[in-house]
Image (tube, rainbow, N blue to C red):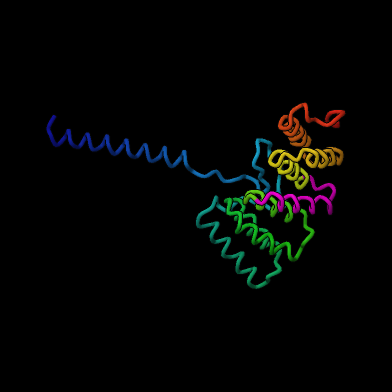
Amino acid sequence: MKRDQLAFLLAGLAFGFLLGFGVFFATSNAPQAPTSSARVASDVPSPAGPAAPTEVAGGGGAPMMAEIGALKQRVAADPKDVAALTRLGNLFQDVQMWPQALEWYDRALQARPDDPDLLTDSGVCLQASGKLEESLERFRRAFEGHPRHWQSMYNFVVVAGLKLGRYADADSVLRRLEGSGAGDATQVAELRHALDQTRGPAAAPAGGSPR
C-alpha cells in the first residue's frame, strides 16, 4: 500500500472514532425533558398536570421560541390572559426552566388565585427548585379548595412522605386521596406502596393501609 493511501486510511479511521465518541457522549449526556407538567422526583409514576396541553410545540427549538414570542405578545396586549400565561408556564416547565415557569404561573395565579392546576404546577416548580415547604403550601391550597383534585394530593404525599419523611402528614393526605375515589387507582395504589416501603413496617399506621 502506498504511503499516501495508508495516511488517508488512518485519517479516516481516526475521524470515525472521534465521530462515534462524539455521538455517544452527546446521547449519554442529553437532558431528559419531562413528559408531563406535574412531574415528581420519585420512582412513583407522575399524575397528569393541568388540563391544558403541555407538550412543547415541535419538540422545542425554533417552533417553541416562535410560540413563546406569540404568547408574550398576547400577554403584552392583555396582562390577564390566563390561557397565555399558563401556556408559557407549561412550556418553560416542560424544559425544566423552573424559575421562568414559576414566574408565569404566579402571574396567572394573580388572576386566578384558587385555580388548583396552577397551584399544583407552581408547586411542582417550587419542589424542583428545592423549596419543599412552599410547594407543600401550594398543594394544600389546591386540594383544600378542591377536595377531589387528586394531582395536588398526590404531589403533597410525594414531597411530605418520600422527600421529607413526614409520614403522618403524608398518610393523612393519602388516606384522603384514597377515600375520595379520584384519580388513577393504579397510580394511587403505587403511591401507597412507595410510602409504606419508604417508612418501613415498623412505622406503618395501626390497622394497615385503608382499602
Between 29 and 76, the residue placed more toward the observer is 29
Which residue is pictured at 43% across the width and 42% down the height? Answer: 26
In the rendered view, does 5 fall on the left or right side of 16? left
Query: Which of the 4 image quarters holds residue 75?
Result: bottom right
Query: Which of the 4 image quarters holds residue 88?
Result: bottom right
Magenta segment range? 131-150
Q: Quadrant of the C terminus?
A: top right
Query: Which of the 4 image quarters holds residue 72?
Result: bottom right
Above-or-below relation of 201 to 146: above
Residue at the extreme front:
202
Which residue is pictured at 72% across the width and 39% down the height? Answer: 165
In the rendered view, does 156 fall on the left or right side of 92? right
Residue 191: image location, x then y, percent? 74, 35
**What secondary structure prevails in the magenta region?**
helix
Q: Quadrant of the N terminus?
A: top left
Residue 179: image location, x then y, percent? 87, 39
State yes or no: residue 123 in magenta: no
Above-or-below relation of 110 to 182: below
Which residue is pictured at 71% across the width and 43% down the height? Answer: 159
Residue at the extreme bottom:
77
